[in-house]
Amino acid sequence: MSHSQFAALERGTQPAFFYLDLNDTVRRAALLTAVVRKKIPTVESLKREYARALAQLNDAPLNTARQPRIVTGGPILRLARARALVDKSVLSSSYRTESRAMAMRHVQHGLLFLSLQHPPLRKLCDLMITDILCWPSLESRGGSVRGLLGIVWLDPSDGLTSLDIAESLIHEMVHLNLDLADMTFGLFTRAPGSHFESHSAVLGRRRPYYQAFHSACVAVGIIYFRLLVGMHGEIDWLRSSLQRCTCELLTPGSLHGIRLECNSRRPGVFPGTPARSDPRPQGPCLWVPIPVCLTGCL
Ligand SMILES: [Zn+2]
């Protein structure tokens, strides 16, 4: 992100990154819904029908209401455990009723904080996330998996603030949004011989390129949010880690790829837009090695 992009931060505006752009995301969600449900959703029905499409794809009992459902057990937990979203480091019997109620309140406050700070980001979370599962862990703070799109797992322990929870929700929303983009327009190649690794912008260790790409987008989302809420002093490590990650993603091997204009100043640019003339990277754009799948994943 350039300084001018940072300077343009305002609570009502939308950044020009496809995974942080509500209108772009609505179009991708509508496309997936239309293909899976075999009918084009209206503005009113989009979240409900999108959630039904995800439920159909995942074979999961997802919430279809406008806003995420917050749960601390039940079928969502069983599914999350069965599909390796949630670990088993804490027994159900040791998660007390009061702790569950507290966790749910924490998440409600986090959602409220997000809607007050940046309504479009809240709307993105409302669209991408069907269920928020609160569950403690000794090993992780939460996550999401591609096999359970719509569900976000959080461990909202006492030490976390509403700001921390809002940031975690943005983090997972970006993952879910990238998965949606990959399923509709195609982000990553699965072609033999195209695999390479880069340092993750978030974890700081080498990861397969598609996970490193996820981490770069998540880092941008986190930096964007931290700047938005005035945490200017808490982005330095992430910014340099993001720089290393994107430098490694921009390897010569990627010159056969496509231009991914997620860093463009133009909002509304879908991933996978082919370069018009010079196939080499220009300006601040990220590259990916070779476009694949398009709608083949569906
Ligand atoms: Zn992540």
Image: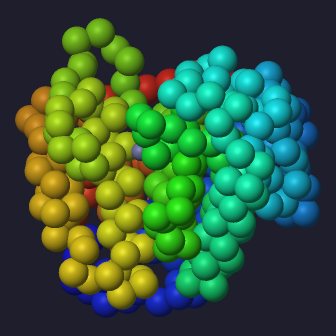
Examine the rendered structure and indicate whether residue 214 appears above or below residue 267.
above
Residue 108 appears left or right of 74: left
What residue lies at 24% left-to-right and 19% top-to-bottom?
A: 194
- Ligand 1 falls in which quarter? top left
Nearer to the camera, 44 or 219: 219
Q: Residue 124: percent from the left, percent from the top? A: 63, 63
* Image quarter of the C terminus: top right
Residue 66, quarter of the rendered image:
bottom right
**Position of 33 compared to 181: left or right?**
right
In the image, residue 93 lies at what x, y percent?
A: 70, 32
Residue 288 horizontal/vertical position (percent): 29, 38
**Residue at left 84%, top 45%?**
63
Left or right of 181, for residue 40: right
State how the image is colored.
rainbow
Residue 133 visible in the displayed image: no
Residue farthest along the top direction in this orientation: 192
Give me the residue at 71% from left, 66% from top: 105
Between residues 109 and 218, which one lies in front from this camera angle? 109
Examine the rendering and report whether any part of residue 200 can be seen. Answer: yes
Residue drawn where x is 20% and y is 56% of the image: 242
| Total labels drawn | 0
Q: Using the image, determine if residue 249 lies above or below residue 210.
A: below
Quadrant into which the N terminus falls: bottom left
